[in-house]
Image (spheres, coloured by chain):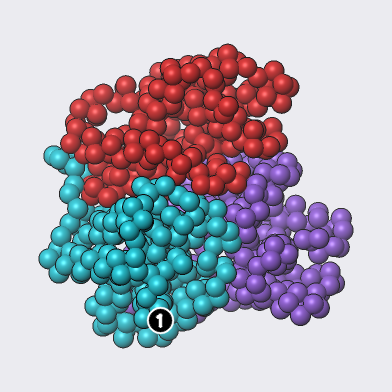
Chain colours: A cyan, B red, C purple
Amino acid sequence: MTTLDAGDAQHALELAGIVAFALSGATLAIRKGFDAVGIVLLALLTALGGGVIRDLLIGATPPAAFRELELLVLPVVAALVAMVAHPVINRLFRVVLLLDAAGLALFSVTGTLIAAEAGIDPVQAAVLGIVTCVGGGVLRDVVARETPVLVRADSDLYAVPAALGAGLVSALEQAGAYTPTAGLLAASAVFLLRVAAMAFDWRAPVARRPRRAAER
Amino acid sequence: MTTLDAGDAQHALELAGIVAFALSGATLAIRKGFDAVGIVLLALLTALGGGVIRDLLIGATPPAAFRELELLVLPVVAALVAMVAHPVINRLFRVVLLLDAAGLALFSVTGTLIAAEAGIDPVQAAVLGIVTCVGGGVLRDVVARETPVLVRADSDLYAVPAALGAGLVSALEQAGAYTPTAGLLAASAVFLLRVAAMAFDWRAPVARRPRRAAER
Amino acid sequence: MTTLDAGDAQHALELAGIVAFALSGATLAIRKGFDAVGIVLLALLTALGGGVIRDLLIGATPPAAFRELELLVLPVVAALVAMVAHPVINRLFRVVLLLDAAGLALFSVTGTLIAAEAGIDPVQAAVLGIVTCVGGGVLRDVVARETPVLVRADSDLYAVPAALGAGLVSALEQAGAYTPTAGLLAASAVFLLRVAAMAFDWRAPVARRPRRAAER
């Protein structure tokens, strides 16, 4: 229902996205010198945080992360694997970034659909789709005491592709024209935009005439 | 119902308060060198965060910010205006501070009323009134990696005027003596107290005999 | 129902745990040079944050902290006492650490039971038990801009004893074998493990081969 209805392949990609999000949390925790508790915590927050915030906002309690056991187990396993294999994961960072882009793409679509099906109006549903894919990363960076990658001027476009996908899906859903095929196309567009943003260093604009003492 | 029932003037002031909160988030984001995504995010968090937390705590999902479109649109517009016009906004900071005080005053009253009407007991309703007006600023500062202004010893009274207004409204509501006129008077008192605190640098007390290595 | 059913002694210990959590928040705020608002805020967040997050996740709104007045009043009183008596409290830090361990132990058990009784599955209920006892401390550290003690490699085991207690209680509850006596034994085990961890500096493992530029 709340999926793209494309079956097993899509479900596998969603779980791959969860794992990629978890690995990004775990590797940051390792880089910061956190202990095993911190590594597991950051993996869980990054992988599940966005969806949990969305579910709380639409009143769907307990959130999916506390209903479907695999959603809770996968990030913990990813964190433990990262603890012993992080040099390998660091070498595979391009693969992790691609899986992360897949997660971003799929969750922007499914997050929007879940919100729309809960009766949320179109614009707000798209916002909740964006929250689904970027919320976890913000929680990760706040707990790790990093400036959120999401807001950094030197980070490649991340929320913008998600916003385009979420907006498109919400408009189609609102017009009664949403189909699983359209969802897959929207997710593909988000994925390609994100990959292109990384390849060509596309960035969001900053404020006009930034003040001198900008970065403190 | 959950308003001061003073009609259009009050509604306009509430929206002005939302805009002032959004501008304080956007200008902090600009000062920190964040990109457009960060500027919009901080505007939304600051303007809507307190009300969203209150609504989640009283179980009113989706929160007002995800039901009334203008609440979501206004902070985004304010953020975009701030991106191009922030030198002007910086020169108008006294106006923004006055609008912020108006927001503080109105939301301490309406936040308390919304909680009381949801069946929350008096003391807790007043606390939720305070949460409504200070929650967004704390989220703003946490995401921007600043020590929350709310807790800084060198910041003028902010939560204290809100607490007085929220407590007064909650007591009147509990006694069955609340009227829209009383609400407007309470909001006016909060506003004047906040403005006086800024004018005369009134501050909250700190701990007795602060330790030597206090601020790190 | 959601308690260990051991009556007044247990209730007194729970309130002592709340006070200990509040004191840890208040003393951190004092050490950071925060004002009275910050001291009260950190006391409340630390004492009540974990339970509030759990209640939001299981859909139990308003959270207990906004239903039972003593839960809100006690941390405020503890914060005000800390403001004038923090040199005494600093000298009594071993007592505070023992009360904190008692809070950790009791809340890992009662938090798990509350989640299980809300219909949450066993593994997830145990996770919510852990969230109950560690969530407040993470909020405290995030607002105070400290690396969360929970994730620091140089902190003694805290979440691990809680996880063992929560897991044990959840397994017993699932097997229909939970009794108040079992709950008290589980809490005692958590308490003793935590005290032993502090006495012998037991720590959680870190990642294999930490990278050179680990702690920034």
Q: Residue furthest right?
A: C7
Local packing at callout 1 (Cα closer than 10 Å; few below 14, some 14-19, many 20+) is few
Name which residue lies at 39% across and 28% down.
Answer: B15
Question: Splitting the image into 4 quarters, where does residue C80 fall?
Answer: top right
Specify whether C6 is left or right of B24: right
Residue A17 visible, this orientation:
yes
Quarter of the image that includes the N terminus of chain B: top right
Q: Where residue A137 sits in the image (x, y, percent)?
A: 37, 62
Q: Residue furthest front?
A: A176
Q: Residue at x 31, y 75 (%)?
A: A99
Q: Nearer the viewer, residue B191 or A56?
A: A56
**Residue located at (51% from left, 62% from top):** C149
Image height check: is A8 above or below A58? Answer: below
Check disc 1 and give the amino acid type.
Asp
Evaluate whether residue C95 shows in this view. Answer: no
Q: Position of residue B58 (x, y in %)?
A: 61, 43
The vertical placement of C151 against C171, above or below, is: above
Q: Which of C91 and C133 lies nearest the eye of the viewer? A: C133
Q: Dot 1 corresponds to which residue?
A: A8
Residue B12 position by quadrant: top left
Q: Secondary structure at mark 1?
A: helix
Place of residue C7 in the rendered image (x, y in percent of width and height, measured from the top left): 87, 58
Vertical placement of residue B148 versus A155, above or below: above
